Amino acid sequence: IGSGGVTRRNMDWIAVGAIAELVGVVAVVITLIYLADQVRNNTRMAQRASTAEAVAAIRTFSVSLVDNREVGELFQRGVNLGLENLTDEERVPFAIMMFNLLKTCEHLHYQHAVGAMDPDVWEGWDHIIRGYLTALGSQEWYQERRIASSSNFRNYLDNSAPDEGFKLLGQIG
């Protein structure tokens, strides 16, 4: 019998208990690390899906301009020449197109701002967004509806200018 009435067998059980407790702590830490990694991966996948959805919306918008010649001409005229070149009847569909385009571009900008979009991918979208949303008709429409966008996106648009040499629809070669 050891000192204080503790037997060797009791000491063995104490050691086994301490080892088991240590193993349990390590297992909990590993589980927490794994769960944090899974949450991070799920967040990235959700952000990528959200970006893909915005890109799909831009593609759908673009296809609508090609598939319906009148819609494409209306958009081109409104963006390139300004609102005064649209009739009262044309301003409503133009406003709807611009709102959809603006909100989709805002979403793309948000994905970039939160780091969910690769910087190389954003570079191309930035070029297109700045080109179209800084055009005459877009700016006329936007200035009356600025508050419909987040302050972060408003700041981006308010400090944007198209890249040198950017050509709008109807200006392309």
Image (spheres, rainbow, N blue to C red):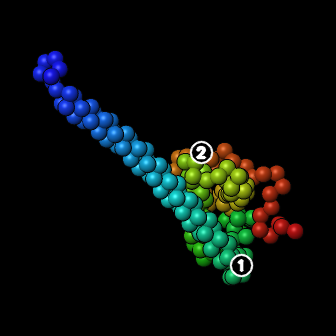
Q: Can residue 88 be seen in this snapshot?
A: no
Q: Amino acid at mark 2?
A: Asn
Q: Amino acid at mark 1?
A: Val
Residue 20 at x, y percent in the picture: 29, 39
Q: Is residue 7 above or below residue 112?
A: above
**For the point 68% across and 72% down, which residue is it?**
62
Q: Which residue is mark 2?
A: 155
Residue 33 at x, y percent in the picture: 43, 44
Q: Can residue 59 be seen in this snapshot?
A: yes
**For the point 41% across and 50% down, which residue is it?**
35
| Secondary structure at numbered mark 1 | helix
Q: Residues within 10 Å of mark 2 (few under 14, many from 20)?
A: few
| Secondary structure at numbered mark 2 | helix
**For the point 56% across and 59% down, which residue is it?**
48
Residue at the far left: name it: 5
**Residue 30 appears in which quarter of the rendering?**
top left
**For the point 72% across and 56% down, which residue is it?**
124
Q: Which residue is mark 1?
A: 66
**How many numbered marks appear?**
2
Q: Quadrant of the C terminus?
A: bottom right
Q: Residues within 10 Å of mark 1 (few under 14, many from 20)?
A: few
Q: Quadrant of the N terminus?
A: top left
